[in-house]
Image (cartoon, rainbow, N blue to C red):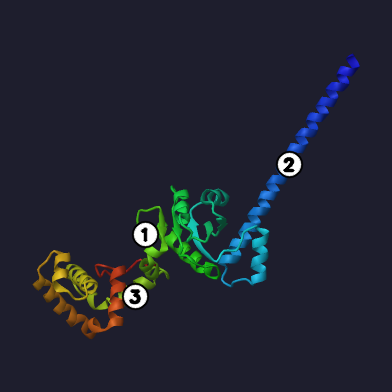
Amino acid sequence: PADLYVIAGALFGYVDALAGAAAEGFLAEQRDTAQDWATTRRRLVTLLVQPDPPTGAVLHAAADAARWPLPATVAVFSVEGTDAEHVARGIGAGALAAVVGDAIRVVLPEPGTPGRLDRARQALVGRRAALGPTVQRQQARLSYRLSRRALTLHQQGALGPDPVVSCDDHLLTLLTAWEPGLAGHLAGTVLAPLAGLRPTTRRALAETLHGWLRRQGQVVAVAEDLHTHPQTVRYRMRQLRGLFGPALDDPDARLLLTLALHQSPAGEPDRSGDG
């Protein structure tokens, strides 16, 4: 009996060692598989948003490898963080996520499906994120680029307090801030006639011109917006016509003035150098 006890103890110990080795092997395989899936998904996201669209065969092969049915339309979220898999699981609905650059990029298939965007926004509560426009799958890079730029502006505090913003709600800001320095240069060039004025006069004329452009020349409405007398608005507009001349009647010039005043509402010269 004593010998049998020793043998049985050795056998049980050996079985325990085998079970432990099997568990370690299973976990290692799971980790390798997860890494393979992450690589496969990242490759597919990269193919969808790269500058040169891949051929249909390449894209279909990558989608098959990721077990992701190719949708007709997509929208791309740019999200702060690096836990792409966690974000994708939270959004669900076939969302594909990978870290590209300095943020998570989430490709959401068929975003027009009822409730899909709402669920995605709910899943991103507590994070800063930007939603690109819904586009055809072949235009996924456009949605990606807009959401990427919007997230950068959002982090700089330029798109308001909401944690999740939509590019479609901030197109003017995206347009004027797309190329760093360009909007500031535009404002400095277009508003040059105001540059030589005293700061208080420059601000008053810039605010009046901005209101006049927004109200399409309705003096009374501009006066109400500025809490001043219509005669004051007329006086300032005579000054502005003396400074800008025929530009105030030219549609293209008025568009440039509107953009410049959106960038610099008080007509102040831009010295930031980064638009």
- Label 3: which residue? 186
Label 2 or label 1, whichever lies nearer to me, is 2
Residue 256 circle label: none
- For the question of whether residue 275 can be seen, the reply is no
What's the residue type where badge 3 is placed? Answer: Leu
80 with respect to 7 (left or right): left
What x and y, as percent, mark residue 222? 17, 69
Whole-number angstrom distance, CA of label 2 to CA of label 3: 61 Å
What x and y, as percent, mark residue 250? 26, 84
Query: Which quadrant: the C terminus?
Result: bottom left
Query: Which quadrant: the N terminus?
Result: top right
Label 3 or label 1, whichever lies nearer to me, is 1
Residue at horizontal 17 percent and vertical 74 percent from the top: 218
Q: Is residue 5 above or below residue 143?
A: above
Of label 2 and label 3, which has the lower sequence position? 2
Q: Is residue 182 above or below residue 77?
A: below
- Label 2: which residue? 26
* Quadrant in the rendering for residue 109: bottom right
Q: Is residue 180 above or below residue 88?
A: below
* Quadrant in the rendering for residue 61: bottom right
Label 2 or label 3, whichever lies nearer to me, is 2
Q: Residues within 10 Å of mark 3 (few under 14, many from 20)?
A: many
Asked whether the residues under the numbered discs 2 and 1 touch, taking CB atoms below 8 Å apart as contact, a structural biologist would say no
- For the question of whether residue 79 can be seen, the reply is yes
Q: Residues within 10 Å of mark 2 (few under 14, many from 20)?
A: few
What x and y, as percent, mark residue 57? 67, 70
Q: Is residue 253 above or below residue 6?
A: below
Residue 159 circle label: 1
What's the residue type where badge 1 is placed? Answer: Leu
Q: Residues within 10 Å of mark 1 (few under 14, many from 20)?
A: many
